[in-house]
Amino acid sequence: MKKFIIVVTVSLFALMVIAGGAMAAQKVNIRISACNSLTHPQTIGLNVMKQYVEAQTKGNVVIKIFPNSQLGSEEESLAQVQTGSLEMATASIGPVTTFQKKFFVLDIPFLFNSYNEAWMVMDSKVGRGLLDSLEEHGLKGLCFMENGFRHVTSSVKPINTIADFKGLKIRTMQAPMHMANFSALGANPTPVPWSELYLSMQQKIVDGEENPIANMWDLNMYEVQKYVSLTRHIYDGMPLVANLKWFNKLPKEYQEAIMVGAVLGQNYSRFVNAGREDAILAKLTQKGMKINTPSAKAMDEIKKKGQPVVIDKVKKEVGAEYVDKFMKDIKAVKADTLKGLN
């Protein structure tokens, strides 16, 4: 009897060891859809995340990045993540608002004066709250990969004053708040998907467009545009999202590695983008583009014309109370930079 008990005990222990080993060795493949090239700041950030996660999980989690919209447009990729046919994707704020209207608040123009202000807000409870709100729609918000401040380019004239927007046929994302802003400024906003943007500029379907500086270089806009006007009208972080059910089923140590890796990648993408913008502008100048910065007076007039229109429109979508609290929270975060300096 004693021999039988010993044999059974040893067998059970062996099974436990085997089961534990199997759990530790669980293999996970993650596909991430990205609209930009492999050398864009957000994709470079995704690669930092990939390296960290694969190292932390000893190769048991393998991440493959699909750049240049290989798996579909931003909207299509987000839909695939929501349905569970794709693990992760990044997207600009505009497409994300299709899935969670609360993100409309980030399409209010001129919320931030600098990258530091934008990053503080995105990393505070304000940004985290927005990412967490995606869970209502089956998505796990991990971080904001960097895209940068959006600026205006044109093939016909620079933007020096609000009058220069009048009649300008400008490409926007399929983002209603972007369109409302440019309509208020007197322009003719025309939504065009990212994948069709170059052709639409080449064929003169649009006069200009608006994008972060990194995207101007990524798409060789110097071939089809003449002017870059540094308007900084919207800061555009790119949420990295995962399918919520899939994420929650992962072993806890894998979840932790992914969440830490996402933030490391986010921060790296920010520094890459901020560090290269001047270099890109210099390259664009070499390619023949003319760069200008509208005066502070002109930008103030542009802000006063467009921002109230967009705020009113956002309130109709998500409620005045939510928008008012969002604006109040942003003000509180910004105030922290001056605490104790009175």
Image (cartoon, rainbow, N blue to C red):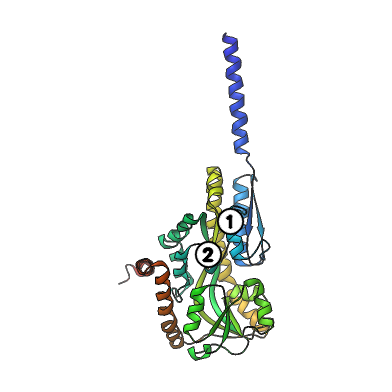
Label 1: which secondary element: helix
Quadrant position of residue 31: bottom right
Residue 125 sits above or below residue 26 on the image: below
- Specify which label sits upstream in the sequence, 2 or 1: 1
Look at the image and tell me whether residue 340 can be seen. Answer: yes
Q: Nearer the viewer, residue 313 or 334?
A: 313
Residue 198 sits above or below residue 41 on the image: below
Horizontal and vertical percent position of residue 282: 63, 80
Horizontal and vertical percent position of residue 239: 53, 62
Q: Crowdedness of circle 1 by 10 Å Cα count: few (<14), some, many (20+)?
A: many
The numbered mark at residue 158 is: none
Look at the image and tell me whether residue 116 can be seen. Answer: no
Horizontal and vertical percent position of residue 138: 51, 54
Q: How many marks?
A: 2
Which residue has dot 2 on it?
A: 96
Q: Give the residue displayed 41% in from the left and 67% down from the top.
A: 318
Horizontal and vertical percent position of residue 311: 41, 75
Q: Give the residue displayed 65% in from the left and 63% down from the top.
A: 72
Q: Nearer the viewer, residue 54 or 1?
A: 1
Residue 159 sits above or below residue 112 on the image: below
Residue 180 sits above or below residue 35 on the image: below
Which amino acid, mark 1?
A: Val
Q: Give the residue displayed 57% in from the left and 64% down from the top.
A: 91
Q: Crowdedness of circle 2 by 10 Å Cα count: few (<14), some, many (20+)?
A: many
Label 2: which secondary element: helix
Q: Verify CB contact (< 8 Å) between mark 2 and mark 1.
A: no
Which amino acid, mark 2?
A: Val
Measured in 3D between alpha carbons, the distance from the residue under mark 2 to the one under mark 1, in whole angstroms, is 12 Å
Q: Quadrant of the C terminus?
A: bottom left
Which residue has dot 1 on it?
A: 81
Q: Is residue 300 left or right of residue 69?
A: left
Q: Is residue 306 left or right of residue 292?
A: left
